[in-house]
Image (tube, rainbow, N blue to C red):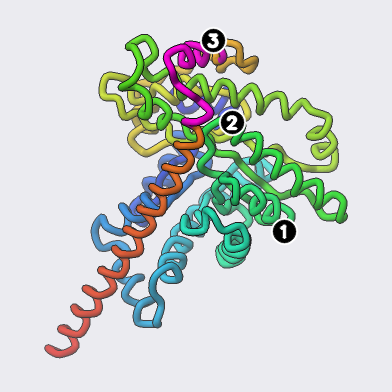
Amino acid sequence: MKPTERLHQLGQSLWLDNISRRILDDGTLRRYIDELCVTGLTSNPTIFDEAIGAGDAYDAGIRSKARAGKSGEELFLELALEDLRRAADMFRSIFDATDGVDGWVSMEVSPLLADDTAGSIEAALQIYRQADRPNLFVKIPGTVQGIPAIEESIFAGVPVNVTLLFSSEQYLAAANAYLRGLERRLAAGLELNVGSVASVFVSRWDRAVNDQVTSALLNRLGIAIAGRTYHEYRELLLSARWQKLAAAGAQPQRLLWGSTGMKDPAASAAFYVEALAAPDTINTMPEKTLLAFAEGGQVNGAMADDGSGAETVLHKFSQAGVDVEALAAQLQHDGAQAFVKSWTALLQRIADKSEVLAEAGSQVAKTA
């Protein structure tokens, strides 16, 4: 049995943190679904920037949309949703078979809206309607301004992938926004079948502190934060507040581990995947990480849900001078800024390609 299948049997969903027209066209994504138990995927501006910049797979689409007068975010959204609709259709049978628990794809609102609650609410609704797929999450960052946008979007019936979460406190803020949205739907007599996941980023913790701690603490902070958050997640699912919503037909907002690619060359590429094996969660991983885990990964049982081991490790980091709360806020801020940078680069790439393709078309027309 492949490691990916063992992880799936443990109760964790494996999602791919990648999308491109290439893996849709050449059958790669279909193979990952059939052979590696991949049951969903996530995307972000960096992923699309790399996909659009790698070769000419998007050139025809960019050319035709630019000729139709589209540019910038409007053009990109159409390009991205073309890919994501195809992926969503590939996962649709999983979505249906699991009653909406699994089989999702994700599309991000503009990172420029991270501090704009009203703009995020409007953009999320537009993306979901334009996508026209029930198994598409709209990604909204779990920033201070994003939390009310998450609640309003859930109340409006828009499935949400809460992104840029780095701590148990940030996770609980997102979870409570989800619960409030559902509670408002319940009070209004609306159905509660609005999906959500809460994406907690892991590896960035270790990249932030590895050069400040002893070798005994290398690559241990991210896993400890995840352990603390997983404990809060399990406790929330046992709460009377959640049980009332579940009895009325709500699905849990599942915890998703993001940023699970290992950057430390001295560590195993599958390090975070192996350490984060946990029932009722999702691990979204880059292609390289997925293939490394499928080739030689180990499933050594589920991570503890009582949080005790995590707290022991976190105490050691505190003694080493790491202020976890302050670092969580910094990581979220830096993550939001990084997405803005990627978004700007993505739109510039599309603008540059549009110009080059238009010039090439003019030259062809002149010589015809």
Magenta-tinted stretch: 311-327
Residue 257's disc number: none
The residue beneath circle 2 is 281
Which of marks 1 and 2 precedes in the sequence?
1
Judge by depth and name the residue closer to the eye, 252 or 152: 152
Judge by depth and name the residue closer to the eye, 182 or 63: 182
CA gap between label 1 and label 3 equals 41 Å
Image coordinates for residue 164, horizontal then vertical, percent: 51, 42
The residue beneath circle 3 is 312
Give me the residue at 60% from left, 11% from top: 308
Which of marks 3 and 1 precedes in the sequence?
1
Give me the residue at 46% from left, 68% from top: 78
User: In the displayed structure, would residue 248 be above or below residue 139?
Assistant: above
Q: Closer to us: mark 2 or mark 1?
A: 1
Secondary structure, mark 3, is helix
User: In the displayed structure, would residue 319 be above or below residue 123?
Assistant: above
Secondary structure, mark 1, is loop
Give me the residue at 57% from left, 67% from top: 130
Image coordinates for residue 335, horizontal then vertical, percent: 43, 43
Asked whether residue 284 appears in the rendered view, the answer is no
Q: Closer to us: mark 1 or mark 3?
A: 3
Q: Quadrant of residue 205?
A: top left
Kind of residue at disc 2 = Thr
The residue beneath circle 1 is 156
Main secondary structure found in the magenta portion: helix
Circles 3 and 2 in contact, beta carbons < 8 Å: no
